[in-house]
Amino acid sequence: MLGVAQSAILLLLILTRYRNRRNMPLVLILFTLAARLGTIPLWNYQTLIAHPWTMVVFSPIPFLGGPLVWWYARESTLVGAEATPPLFPLHFAPYFIEAVAVGALILSLEPWEFQATAARIFSANPPWWIGARNVLKLISGLTYTLLAARLAFTPKRSSSVLMQDPKHRHWLKVVVLGPVGIWASFSMVALRPELAGQVAERAPIAYVAVALAMMVVFYAVSFHILITPEALSPRQVHERVRREHGVSPEHVERVAERVRRELEHGGYQDPELSLTTLAKRVSAHPNHLSLAINDTFGESVPSLLNRYRLQHFVSEIEQGALEHRTILDLAFDAGFPSKSTFNRVFKECYGTAPSQYAARRTNGTPRNGTPRNGQPRLAGDSYSPGS
């Protein structure tokens, strides 16, 4: 209960003072951990018989932990649309699949059958599917933790200037590595489902270990918030990075304006354009360029270039360029380095293949031209870090 109270305080702190899109996964991590920790004492035969819904709602929660940690790592290391995990809803589908499956199973059983099933769950010989789903939860959690650690421990993969700050990197490592202890302790329960049969007699050590691991995560997060509260405020991290690199807001604006002019003059059409080469063209340090683009456009360099290229491609389509040129020709002319990159970026933005989009335009029928994440960001759009 101390852990639940601790998480409630952290949730209130983040929701009232550090409201930010990047912190949403962290809020959900703390919420799900608190829900799971608070319901560990309810995992017994008597509660299951009296309140079957507890198994439907709370038992699948471990399926949420891994995806949420990975999502937070992406929000902390990537920028703009890149931060949202691809195929976002699918990563959380296992929770709902198990909840629906368990709920359907309970509803399909007669009262006496459900009592017999509950008795088997809390016996030395539980149903096979109890252990199977525990193993799936463990595999899911460890897989997503590895994906999150890959982002947290390899700053070169980052497109966010937040990762230029040592304190931010340290904070992210704490959040990513904290759940490792939870998964390690959970493995003792997951791989030995027969331990549930001891709940009526005493609290098995494995269950106590899981609860303690969750509490350690809560306290580690809370102490780091006390030590470095700016970890939850991207704006403050941006300002600290500026100070450490000796970059003034005016310099950031000048670099952003030079980038805007370079791209508006067609610089994006160079398929080899990158952070380094663009920095040379606008006479800026790569770190300053990354900071300027993050602050002004709210995107990483690849994302910004791809948006300009998409605008170029769509503009050519609307002007009837397909009457004498191919889709691939227009894509290369826009600056896309390969066909696969063009198809992927276009579908992510517009939700349809380029050929389908072009066919609707050629036939004169209404098109679904609105990108999935809204209109492609224009060069003059402003962005406020932390918004």
Image: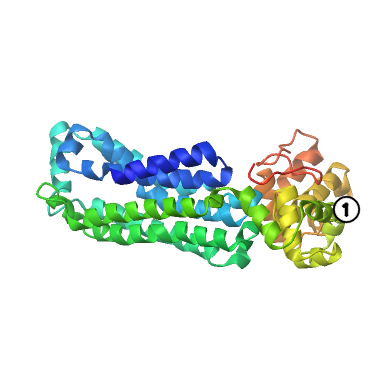
Residue 342 can be seen in this image: no
Residue 6 placement, left or right of 1 = right
Q: Is residue 17 above or below residue 321?
A: above
| Residue type, mark 1 in image | Arg
The C terminus - image quarter: top right
Q: Give me the residue at 42% from left, 50% from top.
A: 222
Badge 1 element: helix
Q: Position of residue 383 (x, y in %)?
A: 72, 44
Q: Residue sitting at 36 percent across and 47 percent down?
A: 33
Q: Residues within 10 Å of mark 1 (few under 14, many from 20)?
A: some
Q: Is residue 68 left or right of residue 369?
A: left
- Most foreground residue, 67 or 229: 229
Q: Which residue is mark 1?
A: 261
The percent coordinates of residue 63 (x first, y second) are 38, 49
Residue appearing at x 58%, y 48% in the figure: 233
Q: Quadrant of residue 242?
A: bottom right
Q: Position of residue 249 (x, y in %)?
A: 77, 51
